[in-house]
Amino acid sequence: MAKRNNVLTVQNLAVAYGHIQAIKKVDLQVNQGELIVLLGSNGAGKSTLLHALLGKVRPSRGRIIFMGQDITQWPTENIVAAGISIVPEGRGILSLMSVMENLQLGAYHVKHDITENLHRVFKLFPLLEERKKQQAGTLSGGEQQMLALSRALMSSPKLLLMDEPSLGLGPIIVNELYAVIADLHNKGQTILLTEQNARKALKYADRGYVFDLGTSVLSGTGPELSSNPGVRKAYLGGGD
């Protein structure tokens, strides 16, 4: 198997909100074309890590290396322009704007014509093309998640972050969403996602990291984590 280029390295990272240590020590690596899942209970530090990667919170210790550059202290705008985008928890769409305006906002940093990017997302989600003039807030929850993902893809990111993508969605919509995530992954998109639905995420992940109390305590391939007794007991008790 050919060696994959490194996209992201997180070294000895710590993040605090005042006196609260949200991340105590996280080390991880994401290589080009990988789908990496972060597992852990609520409050384990997964979302805080994504916020740190985007420059929304400042680490108190450690380094974030993206595409060979130390971006630990970069402002969010520069990080996004460098090639990191996010599908935030709760989708974060601008509900009073149209579907098309939300997509155009996702391409804010793109210097070239965005027609090809639009074709790409409309091919993934034809429904969005049909509803491009519709107010985003009138879409269903599943449709809003499609829009949030499409908006993140409009910048052709080198690294796509997804924070709890299946949260609040029914099983059929979750299956459809993960079919799209799998398709993106198969086409070479590098993805780092957090997910409460561990069974679903590990089914598609190349590798994963388990967080506990702000620390990355375990890592392995999708099959290794799926078969780990501790992971099975903590995260895989339910059905698919």
Image (cartoon, rainbow, N blue to C red):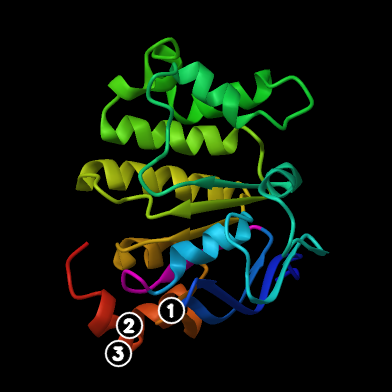
Q: Position of residue 74 (x, y in %)?
A: 74, 56
User: Which label was assigned to residue 210?
Assistant: 1
Image quadrant where residue 60 sits: bottom right
Instruction: Describe residue 116's horizontal placement relative to residue 237 as left or right.
Output: right
Looking at this view, name the residue that lies furthest to the right.
68
Rendered view: 232 above or below 76: below
Q: Secondary structure at mark 2?
A: helix
Residue nearest the observer in this picture, 180 or 215 = 215
Residue on which disc 2 sits: 231
Structural distance between the alpha carbons of marks 2 and 1: 8 Å
Q: Secondary structure at mark 1?
A: strand
Instruction: Give the mark nearer the N terminus: 3 vs 1.
Output: 1
**Proximity of marks 2 and 1: CB atoms separated by less than 8 Å:** yes
Question: Badge 3: how crowded within 10 Å, few (<14), some, or many (20+)?
Answer: few
Observer-side mark, 2 or 1, equals: 1
Q: Amino acid at mark 1?
A: Val
Structural distance between the alpha carbons of marks 2 and 3: 6 Å
Looking at this view, name the residue that lies furthest to the left.
238
User: Which label was assigned to residue 23?
Assistant: none
Q: Amino acid at mark 3?
A: Pro
**Proximity of marks 2 and 3: CB atoms separated by less than 8 Å:** yes
Q: Position of residue 149 (x, y in %)?
A: 47, 38
Residue on which disc 3 sits: 229
Rendered view: 62 above or below 152: below
Rendered view: 167 above or below 70: above
Question: Magenta span covers which residues?
Answer: 33-43
Residue nearest the observer in this picture, 3 or 110 = 110
Instruction: Describe residue 125's horizontal placement relative to residue 76 as left or right.
Output: left
Q: Which residue is depicted at the point 33% across and 30% down? A: 143
